[in-house]
Image (cartoon, rainbow, N blue to C red):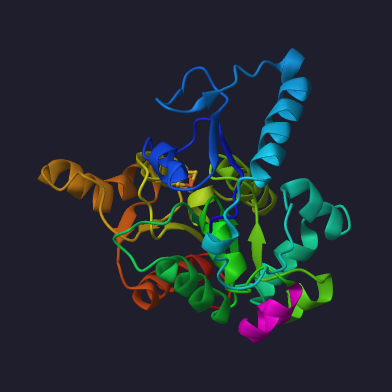
Amino acid sequence: TGAVEAVVVDYQCIMPSMVQISGCYHTKFITTANKARFTGAIHFDIQPATALAQAKEIIALAVDGYAERDRSRVNIPGKPVDIMTGFCNESVVKALGGTLEPLIAAIKSGDIRGAVGIVGCNNPKFQHDSMNVALAQELIKKDILVLVTGCCTTAAGKAGLMVPSAIEMAGPGLRKVCGSLGIPPVLHYGSCVDNSRIIHLCALLANALGVDISDLPVGASSPEWYSEKAAAIGMYAVASGIYTHLGHPPHILGSKVVTDLALHGFEDLVGASFVIEPDPVKAAELLDTRIRTKRLALGLSA
Ligand code: SF4
């Protein structure tokens, strides 16, 4: 945009070319972790004991940079959007009155037919945001609650899915439940390394119902993953018993054994598998079919 005075990074998914891109403008590129230093960046060795003073130094650098902004090159597309964020299991349980029972009742009644965690990145192989947004839209239409983590949160937020009024885009059951709680049908659960929160929620639900996580009407997806970390997180979900969709395959297709294991073999081992589908509507149907199957197996309506 030409309106960024400083980009301050730690070590998650930072492309080295960010230094050159920042150099196209007056933007200062500042690294903060010794294990992820970049040639050409301004480096701060951030330590907990001195972090506050160092953060103030960084902010002062950014403030000084404002004077260097070239207004003729500033181009801010679109408008700011509101989002409701900060959800975690503790806040959800609190909003439900201190117990998961209302959520379990909503799942049993079919108002919430299931839940899918959408996780991960943007990827230049897809039109920006297209897969992340379309999948979330398709799922909430089917009364499937969506939890997002990581960079796809920005996509969902820009698409207006993370405000309470987004219930208008949801199916009737999800609209009713989220409307009564005043929450969006797409809940932001943190960064992409916070997926343990989602698995923890699954564990709480599984324990409450006396079943395995693999028996729950839930799924996971990383529609536009590009970082190997996101694919590894997908493996974490599968290993935990959660059917996991990826928008494009990991680099495993050279091995038939590994590919077969990922797509089918894990099912016998852990009760879940990967599925690859680049079309968001078809991906939503696959996740919906899985949720339908799991609901019927639990003796619930489809
Ligand atoms: S969502 Fe993807 S790009 Fe974003 S921090 Fe996580 S792995 Fe990196």
- Residue 110, given in percent of the width and then of the height, sits at 64, 76
Q: Is residue 211 visible?
A: yes
46 vs 150, left or right, is: right
- Residue 66, given in percent of the width and then of the height, sits at 67, 46
Nearer the observer, 137 or 198: 137
Q: Which residue appears farthest toward the right when viewing the image?
A: 97
Q: Is residue 116 visible?
A: no
Q: Is residue 166 magenta?
A: yes
Nearer the observer, 297 or 26: 26
**Magenta-drawn segment:** 164-175
Nearer the observer, 126 or 164: 126
Residue under the point 15% across and 48% down: 253
Label count reads 0
Residue under the point 36% across and 56% down: 123
213 vs 183, left or right, is: left
Q: Is residue 133 magenta?
A: no
Quadrant for residue 126, please give it. bottom left
52 vs 46, left or right, is: right
- Residue 109, given in percent of the width and then of the height, sits at 68, 76
123 vs 172, left or right, is: left
Magenta portion: prevailing SS class = helix
Nearer the observer, 215 or 73: 73
Residue under the point 52% across and 53% down: 151
256 over 159 or under it: above or below: above
- Residue 235, given in percent of the width and then of the height, sits at 38, 42
Residue under the point 77% across and 21% down: 53
